[in-house]
Image (spheres, rainbow, N blue to C red):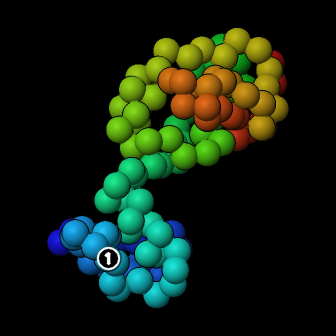
Amino acid sequence: MTELTCIVCPMGCTLQVTQGADGITVIGNSCPRGAQFGKAELTDPHRSLTTTVHTTLATLPLLPVRTDGEIPKALVPKAMAALAKVLVEHPVKAGDVILPDLLGSGIDVIATATATE
């Protein structure tokens, strides 16, 4: 049995997730999304990633960015290392793609702020 705190909504339900011969059982969830989260967390956890990247722009030397979807949790350290090497050298608008197809995941990294010269 694995005990998890559900992060799908603000309720933060404590889940007990067990994997047996008949599949994965989740108890403690207040909604169906909690059961889905528990099963996914046990078999293939994913996360959204938010961080910053460096720029050469005086108005915003650190640009906030995020993934436009969830990446496998195991890729987060490699993703952070890849993003540490990114340098934005031109103005960007919120929503612009900063790094396409992060580590071959099919997920883009997008700006969450507008940065001008």
Quadrant where the image shows the C terminus: top right
Observer-nearest of 65 and 28 = 28
Residue at the spot x=47%, y=82% of the render? Answer: 11
The vertical placement of 21 against 62, above or below, is below
**Residue 41 screen position, x and y as percent:** 37, 59
Classify residue 105 by image quadrant: top right
Residue at the spot x=78%, y=30% of the render? Answer: 96
**Residue 72 screen position, x and y as percent:** 44, 42
In screen coordinates, is 85 left or right of 18?
right
Residue at the spot x=40%, y=36% of the render? Answer: 76
Observer-nearest of 51 and 58 = 51
In screen coordinates, is 48 left or right of 25?
right
Helix, strand or loop at mark 1 = strand
Residue at numbered disc 1:
25
Q: Which amino acid is tagged 1?
A: Thr
**Residue 8 screen position, x and y as percent:** 51, 69
Observer-nearest of 11 and 107 = 107
